[in-house]
Image: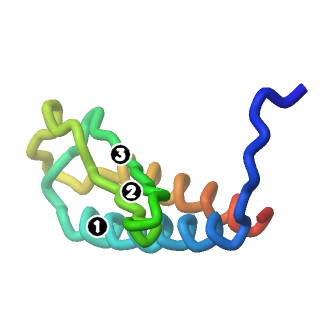
Amino acid sequence: MCLLNIEIDKELNKVVIRKFIRILEAIHTAIQNIKDMEFVSSSLLMVYDASKDSLNEAIIKLIDFENAKQSQEQDKDILEGIENLSGVLREIYEEI
C-alpha cells in the first residue's frame, strides 16, 4: 500500500540528476587538485529547490570540515565516495 500518491515528472527528474552529476564532476575535479588535505568525516549536502521561481536549482556543498586536516597525500576516500555517488545517480538516470 502506498501512503503517498505523487505524480513524478520523469523529464524533470532527469534534468535535476544531470545537474547533480555535473556538480559532482566539478567537485571531484577540484578535490583532485588538492594534494595535501584529508576531508575526514566531511559530507556532501545536496539541495534541490522545486519551486517555480527557482528554475529547478540543484546545489551540492561540501560541509563539515571540523575534522579535515593537512595530509601528506591526496584524500582518495572522498574521491571514491564522489565517484560512487555519481555512479548511483547515473544508474537512476538510466532507469528513469
The local crowd at label 2, few if under 14, some if 14 to 19, many if 20 or more residues have their Cα within 10 Å, is some
Q: What amino acid type is highlighted by mark number 1?
A: Gln
Q: Are marks 3 and 1 in contact (CB under 8 Å)?
A: no
Q: Mark 1 points at which residue?
A: 32
Which label belongs to residue 79? 2
91 to 61, vertically: above or below: below
Left or right for 92, reference 71: right
Residue 67 point in image, percent of width and height: 16, 31
Q: Distance between the residues labelled 3 and 2?
A: 15 Å
Which one is in front in this view, the residue at disc 3 or the one at disc 2? 3
Q: What amino acid type is highlighted by mark number 2?
A: Leu
Q: Do the residues labelled 2 and 1 touch (CB within 8 Å)?
A: yes
Image quarter of the N terminus: top right
Residue 79 point in image, percent of width and height: 39, 56
Residue 41 point in image, percent of width and height: 29, 33
Which one is in front in this view, the residue at disc 3 or the one at disc 1? 3
21 to 40, vertically: above or below: below
Q: Label 2's element?
A: helix
N-term-proximal mark, 3 vs 2: 3
Q: Mark 3 points at which residue?
A: 45
Left or right for 70, reference 79: left
Which label belongs to residue 46? none
Image quarter of the C terminus: bottom right
The furthest residue to the front: 52
Point 13% across, 55% down: residue: 36
